[in-house]
Amino acid sequence: MQINRPIYLKQLIDRQHNGMVKIITGMRRCGKSYLLFNLFVEHLKSNGIDERHIIAIDLESLYNEQLREPMALLRHIDEQVHDAAMYYVLIDEVQLLHRFEEVMNTLMKHPNMDVYVTGSNARFLSKDVITTFRGRGDEVRIHPLSFQEYMSAQSDTTFVERHLADYMRLGGMPQTMSMQTEQQKREYLQQLFRNTYLLDIKERYNIRKDDDLEELIDIVASSVGSLTNPTKIANTFKSIKHSTITRDTIKSYLDYMQDAFMIEKALRFDIKGRKYIDTPVKYYFDDLGLRNARLNFRQTETTHLMENMIYNELRLRGFSVDVGQVTLNTKNEAGKSERKQLEVDFVCNQGDQRIYIQSALAMDSAKKKDQELASLRKIDDSFKKVVIVGGMQPTYRNEEGILIMNIYDFLLGRPVHTT
């Protein structure tokens, strides 16, 4: 089964011949190798690139074990270069290459080599790998399948509501698409979390006593879409788990999870004050199936999963995403002044474009509608305002100029800046 990933393929195409190492990053098993060795190679061939000018090396294969030595790899590549035309060097599992940073910088000195790499162990998964190449690396971050990509692989697209429910429960890890039963998918996701992501973190950071780490992962998974911070979590450990884990250790563990692309952090932004607020923050999982698998598929609240899903889609579309706060100065019934804070689920920025987005599972009453629209109404700038709702109701713009968009229109590609 071939699943096209046009957004990421375009990013690779746009970076061709830019004089930098293209570094494909993302969580393990989300499709980095497939993007590079299947979709990108197919693109090159379809655009007339001679197959002899595509040097593809899988360092995970035992057949290529000797190529994990720097000089052996460089000789292997040099032996295949016979003219001054452009050669495309594609290396998978590059972290297995000794002194790979130096090798990449050496390859980039060849004017007729365009270099692309990916990898999937704990060291390479770290977000700070981009600094290894000292400004000569160009990152392409990829995620598990979006809902639109997920739907492209379905033989029957009639029951889109059922497919969305499956996607919210089982996520978008590409390997699950070839599995026949839900039980297979659940077991795969649970094993993947335990034997890959969790093991990577433990090995990279030499975590011996891992009970607290596992408890923390459960807490973060259970509180998707809720504001939290290391101090609050430490207090939970102390009061409920009777653990002595410190705030600093919790912060380190959260950083490890982010470095492994397991979760992302959304900062709070004061919209009227135009400034960031340090804490609390929100954490979202890069794949809902893995999040649900971690909790044995017991906590699948649609409201929180929908919010996480919208966040992931916005990140895939290239937005930076914060949690918005609108602070109001009001008077209570006694006439005393008080400050009230309203939340905007997402403040989305891309270049000079900004969009405010609320996630609302339903707006089935006047009270619920007022509740969801309250924060957006208090924002007095001219940027777009959107509420994404569950269900199949038609997308429309209300009398206040706020776009009310159903979740299916949003996930299947309709832009949130639609007029």
Image (cartoon, grey):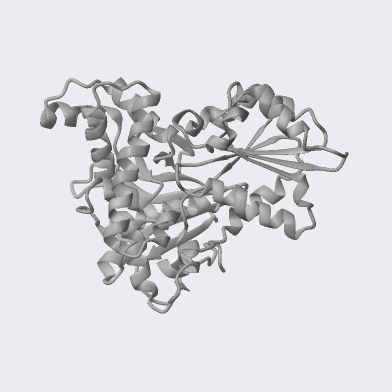
Q: Closest to the observer: 91 or 284? A: 91
x 53%, y 65%: residue? 413
Where is residue 208, by image quadrant? top left
Position of residue 370 measured from the top left corner of the image (x, y, whole percent): 31, 63
x 45%, y 74%: residue? 155
Q: Closest to the observer: 247 or 105? A: 105
Position of residue 206 measured from the top left corner of the image (x, y, whole percent): 35, 20
- Most extreme residue toward the right is 84
> In the figure, is residue 139 to the left or right of 333?
right
Q: Is residue 282 visible?
A: yes
Where is residue 213, by image quadrant? top left
Position of residue 84 measured from the top left corner of the image (x, y, whole percent): 88, 39
417 versus 91 height, above or below: below
- Most extreme residue toward the front is 63
- Most extreme residue toward the bottom is 158
> In the figure, is residue 245 to the left or right of 413?
left
176 versus 124 height, above or below: below
Q: Quadrant of the C terminus?
A: bottom right
Q: Is residue 225 visible?
A: no
x 38%, y 75%: residue? 392
Image label count:
0
> In the figure, is residue 135 to the left or right of 262?
right
59 versus 182 height, above or below: above
Where is residue 96, by image quadrant? top right
Position of residue 390 measured from the top left corner of the image (x, y, whole percent): 35, 67
